[in-house]
Amino acid sequence: MQRPLLGAVFAFLLLSSCAQTSPPEVESEKLQHVYYHRRGGFAGVDDRVEVQPDGHVGIVKRGQPPHEYQLSRDQVRILRDAFNGWSSLRAEYPASEASRDHYDYEVRYGGRTVRGSDANTELPYQLRNVWMTIEAISQQ
């Protein structure tokens, strides 16, 4: 998971550095409130990220001071696009009974909550992509 995460972080930072002015978005294309919570693993990770529709980000990670920043328009677009098809996902993707070291995730977007574990072998690409995109945001 380390390499895809680094790749996602690199791509997110690269795209955000190339930000250009975009025409105003129509209301139906606006980002909705995002809440992300990742916890677990042997290290006892407990990360929370909230993104407001205007792109304002708040991040709280265990053992670190909270911080906030503003996403660029292109970063907001990338995040919004990651949620395409969100309503088609199941509400739960739990870990298998045999899993011992894994992360549990909860993401709320557009009035819908999806919970899952990285130890689930049936995770759709789209859900992993949402997790990696938000994790890239939390690394800034």
Image (tube, rainbow, N blue to C red):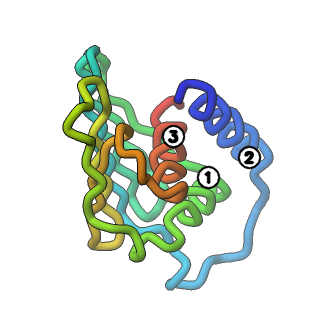
Which residue, given by chain and number where applicable, does mark 2 sit on?
15
Whole-percent x and y of residue 123? 43, 53
- The image quarter containing residue 101 is top left
Compute the Cα span from label 2 to label 3.
12 Å
Whole-percent x and y of residue 1? 52, 30
Residue drawn at (67%, 33%) of the image: 7
Q: Is residue 84 above or below residue 15?
A: below
User: Which mark is drawn over residue 137?
Assistant: 3
Instruction: Indicate the secondary structure of the residue bearing disc 1.
Output: helix
Q: Amino acid at mark 1?
A: Gln
Which residue, given by chain and number where applicable, does mark 1 sit on?
75
Question: Which circle's residue, 2 or 3, is located before the other in the chain?
Answer: 2
Question: Which circle's residue, 1 or 2, is located before the other in the chain?
Answer: 2
The front one of 1 and 53 is 1
Q: Amino acid at mark 2?
A: Leu
Residue drawn at (28%, 15%) of the image: 43
The front one of 74 and 124 is 124
- The image quarter containing residue 98 is top left
Q: Taking 86 as reference, is 119 left or right? A: left
Q: Taking 71 as reference, is 110 left or right? A: left
Q: Is residue 69 above or below residue 27?
A: above
Instruction: Indicate the secondary structure of the residue bearing disc 2.
Output: helix
Residue drawn at (32%, 54%) of the image: 107
Q: Taking 54 as reference, is 13 left or right? A: right
Q: Amino acid at mark 3?
A: Ile
Compute the Cα span from label 1 to label 2.
7 Å
Compute the Cα span from label 3 to label 1.
9 Å
User: Which mark is drawn over residue 52?
Assistant: none
Q: Is residue 106 above or below residue 85?
A: above
Disc 1 vs disc 2: Cβ atoms closer than 8 Å?
A: yes
Query: Dot 1: few (<14), some (14–19), or many (≥20) neighbours within 10 Å?
Result: many
Q: Taking 59 as reference, is 99 left or right? A: left
